[in-house]
Image: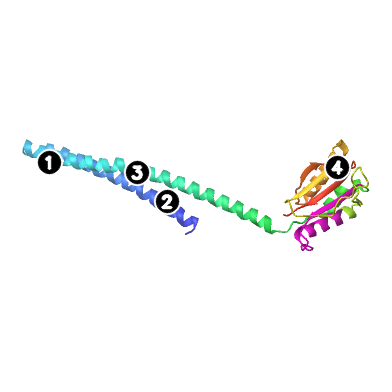
């Protein structure tokens, strides 16, 4: 049953509830008129009292049905509203869960390569390195493909891919790492220029639908960027 059918049924229910309440009022009014007529045109006081008591009992019963029936109808309507709200909330949560699941299933990809290249090109000559988390058998994995795309974009923008980004030039950054994390991480030294460069890279990747975490690596050379790609 669709939402339109549910709304139609609710409208019918509400209209019929109102008609039922008005019908009860009409019955009470009719009984009141009947009581007046009995008193005006009855031939004996015993007969008048007997009929009046009977009519009064019926009137009380009808009024009770009207009063308590109305309260129960209001309570039912409120319960229905609460139920509808819970259903709507559940639908929203399900939709968000489906969206998150779709994101996990969709391979990451920079969708505006030229915009990223344009943002990076003024800083041509800066050093970068990419560490890809993978298992030995993941040569064509999603994170490997993303790393290759990022490497191509940075190289096109004139950046220099260099694994010696530590202040100690005898140290070399690894190209691959065991799978241990999710997402994308940007790391630079902690000086002002390095942090500004990291922010520029962060915003350029974000504008192309790849959002990364940002970290500080005190031992890195100034104005060099390491990008680590984990699972999506």
Q: Nearer the viewer, residue 4 or 232?
A: 232
Q: In the rendered structure, which disc, 4 or 1, sits on the residue that comes first in sequence?
A: 1
What distance separates the C-alpha of mark 2 from that of mark 4? 60 Å
Give the x, y percent position of residue 171.
Answer: 90, 47
Element under label 3?
helix
Q: Which mark is residue 207?
A: none
Which residue is found at the position 78% from the left and 47% from the top?
185
What distance separates the C-alpha of mark 4 from that of mark 1? 96 Å
212 relative to 67 in the view: left or right = right
Q: Give the foreground label among 3 and 4.
A: 4
In magenta stretch: residue 73: no
Q: Dot 4 corresponds to which residue?
A: 197
Residue 70 lies in quadrant: top left
Q: Is residue 82 above or below residue 134?
A: above
Q: How is the image coloured?
A: rainbow
Q: In the rendered structure, which disc, 3 or 4, sits on the residue that comes first in sequence?
A: 3
Q: Dot 3 corresponds to which residue?
A: 72
Q: Nearer the viewer, residue 84 or 197?
A: 197
Q: In the rendered structure, which disc, 2 or 4, sits on the residue that comes first in sequence?
A: 2
Q: How many marks?
A: 4
Q: Give the foreground label among 2 and 4.
A: 4
Q: In the rendered structure, which disc, 3 or 2, sits on the residue that comes first in sequence?
A: 2
Q: Give the foreground label among 4 and 1.
A: 4
106 relative to 147 in the view: left or right = left
Crowdedness near tag 2: few (<14), some (14–19) or many (≥20) residues, C-alpha within 10 Å: few
Q: Dot 2 corresponds to which residue?
A: 11
Element under label 1?
helix
Q: In the rendered structure, which disc, 3 or 1, sits on the residue that comes first in sequence?
A: 1
């Amino acid at each position: 049953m669709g939402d339109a059918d549910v709304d139609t049924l609710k409208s019918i229910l509400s209209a019929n509830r109102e008609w039922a309440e008005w019908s009860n009022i009409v019955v009470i009014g009719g009984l009141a008129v009947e009581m007046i007529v009995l008193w005006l045109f009855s031939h004996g006081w015993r007969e008048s009292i007997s009929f009046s008591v009977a009519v009064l009992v019926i009137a009380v019963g009808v009024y009770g049905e009207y009063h308590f029936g109305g309260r129960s109808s209001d309570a039912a309507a409120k319960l229905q509203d609460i139920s509808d709200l819970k259903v709507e909330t559940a639908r929203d949560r399900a939709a968000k869960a489906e969206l998150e699941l779709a994101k996990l299933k969709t391979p990451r990809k920079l969708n505006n390569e030229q915009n990223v290249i344009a943002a990076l090109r003024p800083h041509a000559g800066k050093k970068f390195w990419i560490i890809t988390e993978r298992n030995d058998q993941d040569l064509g994995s999603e994170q490997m493909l993303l790393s290759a795309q990022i490497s191509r974009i940075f190289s096109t923008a004139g950046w220099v891919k260099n694994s010696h980004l530590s202040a100690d030039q005898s140290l070399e950054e690894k190209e691959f790492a065991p799978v241990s994390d999710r997402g994308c991480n940007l790391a630079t030294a902690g000086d002002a220029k390095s942090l500004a460069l990291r922010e520029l890279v962060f915003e350029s990747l974000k504008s192309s639908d790849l959002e990364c975490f940002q970290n500080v690596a005190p031992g890195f050379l100034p104005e060099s960027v390491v990008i680590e790609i984990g699972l999506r």
